[in-house]
Image (spheres, helix red, strand yellow):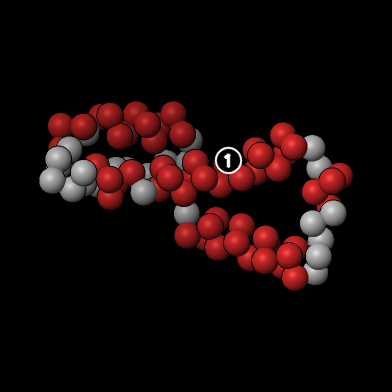
Amino acid sequence: AIQTAFLVGVLYIIMGLFQLGFVTIFLSHAVVSGFTTGAAVIIGMSQVKYIFGYDVENDKAIHKLLQNIFKNIDQFNYKTF
């Protein structure tokens, strides 16, 4: 998640410095929105263990990650929430 956030930030900064904003004209709104949303979901899902207060087994597939979250929901610590 840290690498994804860093990569997205660096990409946006480089595009801003070189004034490459016009490139997004050639990309559809759905592509730009999907890229940004995908990065946000990856970063958000990596922070779930800190929100719920227990260790969540990490996985690359989102449905398996959600399954791992709810599998150990009995370990939820309300004090960290």
Closest to the observer, 58 or 79? 79
Residue 62 percent across, percent down from the top left? 46, 34
Q: Is residue 1 left or right of residue 47?
A: right
Of the 4 image quadrants, the one containing the C terminus is: top left
Residue 69 percent across, percent down from the top left? 30, 34
Residue drawn at 75 percent across, 63 percent down: 15
Q: Is residue 77 left or right of residue 10?
A: left
Q: Quadrant of residue 30?
A: top right
Residue 67 percent across, percent down from the top left? 34, 29
Residue drawn at 63 percent across, 65 percent down: 10
Asked if residue 54 can be seen in this view, the reply is no
Which residue in the protein does label 1 denote? Answer: 37
Closest to the observer, 43 or 57? 43
Q: Does 3 sit above or below residue 37?
A: below
Q: Secondary structure at mark 1?
A: helix
Residue drawn at 79 percent across, 37 percent down: 28
- How many numbered tags mark residues here? 1
> Is the residue marked by circle 1 packed among few (<14), some (14-19), or many (20+) residues within 10 Å?
few
Q: Does 19 sit above or below residue 27?
A: below
Asked if residue 24 can be seen in this view, the reply is yes
Closest to the observer, 17 or 72? 17
Q: Amino acid at mark 1?
A: Thr
Question: Furthest-bottom residue in view?
Answer: 17
